[in-house]
Amino acid sequence: MEILVCVKQVPDDSQKVVLNGSGQPAIDKITPVANAFDTYALEMAARFKEANGGTITVVSVGSEDNKTSLKNCLAVGADKAYVVTDAAFDGSDALSTAYILSKTVEKIEAVDNVKFDIIFCGKESTDYTTALVGPELAQKLGAGVVTCVTELKLNADKLEAKQETEDGYNIIETSMPAVVTITKPNYDPRYPTMKSKMAARKKEIPAFTAADLGTDASMVGAANSVVKTISLSEPPKKQAGIKINEKTFEETFAKAMAVMTEAKIF
Amino acid sequence: MSLTDCKGIMVVIETAGGAAKSVGLEMLTPAKEIANAKNTDVTAVMIGEGLDDAAKQAASYGADKIITVDNNDLKAYSEKHSAVLTSLIEKYKPETVLIGATQNGKDIAPIVAGKLGLGCVTDVVAMKLDANGKIVFTCPLYGGNILADETIETVPQIATVRGGAFKKGEADGTKSPEEIIIAEDMPCGDIKTVIKEAVKEISEAVNLEDAQVIVSGGRGMGSAENFKLVEELAQVLGGVVGATRAPVEDGWISRAHQIGQSGKIVAPKLYIACGISGATQHVTGMIGSDYIVAINKDEDAPIFDIANVGIVGNVMQVIPAMIEEIKKIKA
């Protein structure tokens, strides 16, 4: 099985993002990490490979910096990694990113002389949470797509995906190649070991530019993206609340009840 | 499709058990406002089986036209729905397609957008028209801590709309739509996925999105037994039970109750957070609540930063006392 996992590097989602003085998200001081849903995708890919054999390639579109996240991926199950980086790609929206990824798939297939059977994506990224890129990539590739997957099995020449639904789950069979978007399964991604970290550090991560991919310049970057961001704002601040911590439980509770009754919330 | 060809707003209304989902009817409110301002109309689209009642609902909430694609093949949501919707958009050429941001809505929107090469925005919480008559969509980024105003350059354009973001209008049962188009079948083309099995694990109806009061518990509740206090408090308040990821993963409560990044996004009038520390992954899902009460023994818990009332104390002491007091108030 030839497996590709698409990984986006995002600001650590346990940190609150606010706007800076110039009205842009203040993310420069937040540690960049691999998108949480993409780490679940990689773990599922690693388990799938353990069960069925194959090779796992990870790819990330962004800056040279993304190599940090890709190195981590190489330490927890990925065999190869590529980074796609070009100033021309900056500010690409979901549709444009799906296009860049589709050209990346073609490129890696040509360079490594492979055909991908399964492309794993996180169900959404924790920064923009559009949940668009995976299914849009599937359309560009003419591949089947199953979203919100929590388990994946090989069944002869088809894939069997367990899709989480609002009231349970579906078992969906898809032909290959297929794109699957992964949500949180009931396990956590593995941790790297000293040995796997060392091995990952030694691996090269080749970079592809727009010229390498042969992307059409009129389809990438902020200027050619069809979704335009007009302005950013912060939601209205919640009125400062009160924290009640008196000497005894009785005092705390009485005061809290008084405040809540006053606010007529019950 | 050229710009001049496309007009009107298509509202895709998802149904469950023959009834329209709330978000579908909610979307008719902004759709009608925009259509009025642009002197065009609103078409409700329903894809499924047994859609007569849902079509009446859409009419009573003000859809000008209704298109139903009603057959047994479309009973459960599948890839076929995206193929049908793609064909409908190509045939009826709306300027804007609004889809509820449910799990199925977020599945169908990017598939159709990808097939037709259309711009799409996700989880819209507000809409307005700019000076040129373009719709400006407000979408949450970074877990709702930042809001982006966005426009889409393609026509048609697609947006998924978050449940609860708009209020349903007044239903008027006497209204009948100008036109009802019953399309029995639409070409589905090459279908790559097949649903082999659909399993319903959650039988209880957990309607967190429409709840006015939510009482939620986190890891700080300590055990499945203690978690029952959360349920009891919700019951006295006539509210719905919510949870963070930990109690769900530990099996104290079913996944249907989960609020946050991998669960539901809610916006009740009253949210009571019990033993919840306030990790951003959870706060993302409940920050839109009108009034937040937090109970936590750790006075530095980040949940207190967003609470209207923070009670520093042991949940096992505070919740039972609250239940008693509220019973007195309600008596």
Image (tube, rainbow, N blue to C red):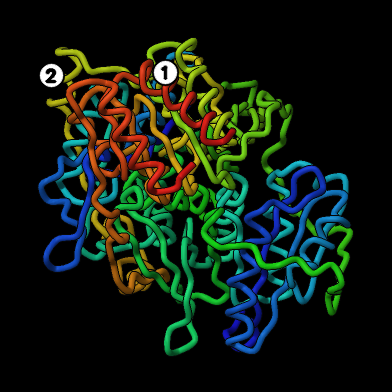
- In this view, the residue in front, A171 or A201, is A171
Which numbered circle lies on residue A187? 1
* Residue density around tag 1, few if under 14, some if 14–19, many if 20 or more, within 10 Å: few
The amino acid at mark 1 is Tyr
Residue A12 falls left or right of residue B314 = left
Could you tell me which chain the residue with mark 2 belongs to? A
Residue B89's spot in the image, x, y percent?
Answer: 68, 69
* Residue density around tag 2, few if under 14, some if 14–19, many if 20 or more, within 10 Å: few
The amino acid at mark 2 is Met
Residue B224 falls left or right of residue B295 = right
Secondary element under disc 2, as helix, strand or loop, is helix
Residue A86 falls left or right of residue A127 = left
Cα–Cα gap, marks 1 and 2: 25 Å
Secondary element under disc 1, as helix, strand or loop, is loop
Could you tell me which chain the residue with mark 1 belongs to? A
Residue A109 falls left or right of residue B94 = left
The residue located at (80%, 67%) in the rendering is B67
Residue B276 in sight in this render: yes
The residue located at (24%, 51%) in the rendering is A240
Q: Are marks 1 and 2 in contact (CB under 8 Å)?
A: no
The residue located at (48%, 36%) in the rendering is B263
Which numbered circle lies on residue A43? none
Residue A153's spot in the image, x, y percent?
Answer: 57, 21
Instruction: Name above or below for residue A15 compared with residue B70.
Output: above
Quadrant position of residue B58 = bottom right
Residue B61's spot in the image, x, y percent?
Answer: 74, 67
Quadrant of the frame with the C terminus of chain B: top right
Residue B110's spot in the image, x, y percent?
Answer: 54, 55
The residue tagged 2 is: A198
- In this view, the residue in front, A214 or B203, is B203
